[in-house]
Image (cartoon, helix red, strand yellow):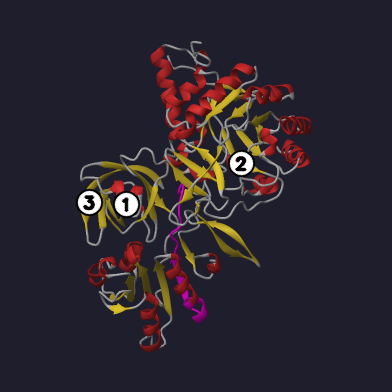
Amino acid sequence: MQLERATVLEHIPIHGGYNLLRMRAPGVAPRVRPGQFIHVKIPHLEECVLRRPFSVFRADGDALAILYKDVGKGTRTLQYLKAGETLSILGPLGHGFPDPNPAAYPIIVAGGYGMAALYLTARTAPVKGIAFFGGRAAKDILCVSDFEALGWTVRVTTEDGSLGRKGIVTDALDEWWLNESAGRAPELFACGPGGMLKAVAHRAIERGWTAWTSMDNSMGCGVGACLTCVLKVREGEGWTWARACREGPVFDARAVLWEEIE
Amino acid sequence: MKPDLSVMIAGIRMKNPVMTASGTFGYGPEYADLVDLNQLGAIVVKGICLAPTKGNLTPRTAETASGLLNAIGLPGPGVDGFVREYLPFLRQYDVPVFVNIWGKTVEEYAEVAARFDAVSGIDGLEVNVSCPNIKEGSALFGTDIRMFERVVRAIRAATKLPVIPKLAPNVSDIAEFACCAEACGADAISLINSFPGMAVDIETRGFKLANKTGGLTGPAIKPIALRLVWLAAKAVKIPVIGMGGITTAEDALEFLMVGARAVAVGTASFTNPDTALNVVRGIEAFLAKEGLASVSDWVGALRE
């Protein structure tokens, strides 16, 4: 990990209020592993003492990109950043997704912009599998063509039925399991809201699948000192705290105490 | 000529007057990839009590205007866990290590102090009498002068290590606590701990912290902290370590100017991990600009 002053290369709206921020970060970008994140000091927001964590969507050479939407003061201010401006980033941080097991069939499950944390896994996976994208509406479904261009099959579900199948993302996963899995042992890579991760984890545990879940906990320092982002994980018969920023954000689904996650 | 930044605090020589504040720098390894620990004046590790503790439930922090509310609740590895898992790491560096200690009873404070007394490689004990987020006891030790006196005396009797009580801000007369610490044989005092505060959410109609209330830190508390440090420094002869919202070298120079002999950087390390080192460089540049030979020439430079 390192602190670096990155330069904005491109900052463009995608759709539905989502933005793509691409920056030149020659120190951080080449070291990013799939599922890791960067911690960003939002420029022009001096009254906020904390950085904001973002999954790295893409890392190509000296450049990396994040995807975000306006969810609060930090991301609202970030929107005004222009190409050529600089920002302080800390990264790459955390334990990301492991390399996919080449003997398993890889499955991606993403809620909303959770897909941003999964693109690098999709790109490096030796076997191209199936990706389930879920969101409230069509505007929450992003970058389908990017995943398809990598050779992945993408299945979309929206809660309002405005794109793809109507329903929630785990419905589509269940359907695949019943009708198409053909005995293949899947390995799941998931990122999205807590409720979605919990539903994915329950299925994985019940069916004996391996599942890796990226936890979207509220974060402080990003390096393991402040102990803000902790979640309960199993330890022997009991539990212990794990830091989403250090031990995570990606955890083996069997390790997490899902009953504590809303 | 380079100004001399070294200071003596509680009998310990520090290369410069900039320490890390307890609870904001973990136990050292967390920031070691980002910060050359050898360039710090001292490291003050997160609070340790006798046995391992888990701390509070989440959410544990809430950002506020120019500040941060926290109710972490002092999770930690306990004395043995710290000595086994973290101290060998810290000892690889040429930097004084102060251990912040706490307990639920006077006896427990004394026992923790005695246990560390028997461990080599620790330069001093900062006594947390003022964590606002522990239900049992700890906050009272910081605000009731009789309790404060009992706990400082008990620790003094239990260890030969330098003892540095960390004062609570929410008392009516900070000088009374500073003088009491000095009279009880403390080698220095540090202040200020976080201010009790709270944040609520109008959407959920609930508290933002699982603990309901927390301690406020960050730039928001700096002017309040500065006044308390000024008052305490005037009241005692032992060194005062000043802290509360220090983010820049100018902030640190203000605390030194009102009488602190060292300072600690806290929440600002979360914003920028290299804050403490930037503060060191900034102090050095300022002293050089002012033509001062050493940082001690600046301590107490306030024109009163």
Which image quadrant for residue B121?
top right
The correct choice, above or below, for B250 with respect to A199 in the image is above
Disc number lying in front (1 or 3): 3
| Residue behind mark 3 | A11
Label at residue A29: 1
Q: Residue at x 55, y 20 (%)?
A: B230
Asked if residue A103 is positioned above or below residue B73 in the image, the reply reads below
Kindly report the distance in space between the C-alpha atoms of the residues bearing marks 1 and 2: 41 Å
The kind of residue on which mark 2 rests is Pro
Subunit that carries the residue with mark 1: A
Residue A254 is one of the magenta-drawn residues: no
Residue of label 2: B132
Give me the C-alpha separation between circle 1 and circle 3: 17 Å
Mark 1 neighbour class, 10 Å CA radius: few under 14, some 14 to 19, many 20 or more: many
* Cα separation between marks 2 and 3: 43 Å
* Residues drawn in magenta: A203-222
Any magenta on residue A212?
yes
Question: Which residue is nearer to you in this view: B137 or B278?
Answer: B137
User: Dot 2 lies on which element?
Assistant: loop
Which amino acid, mark 1?
Ala
B29 or B211, which is in the foreground? B211
Drawn side of residue B140 relative to residue A172, left or right: right
Secondary structure, mark 1, is helix
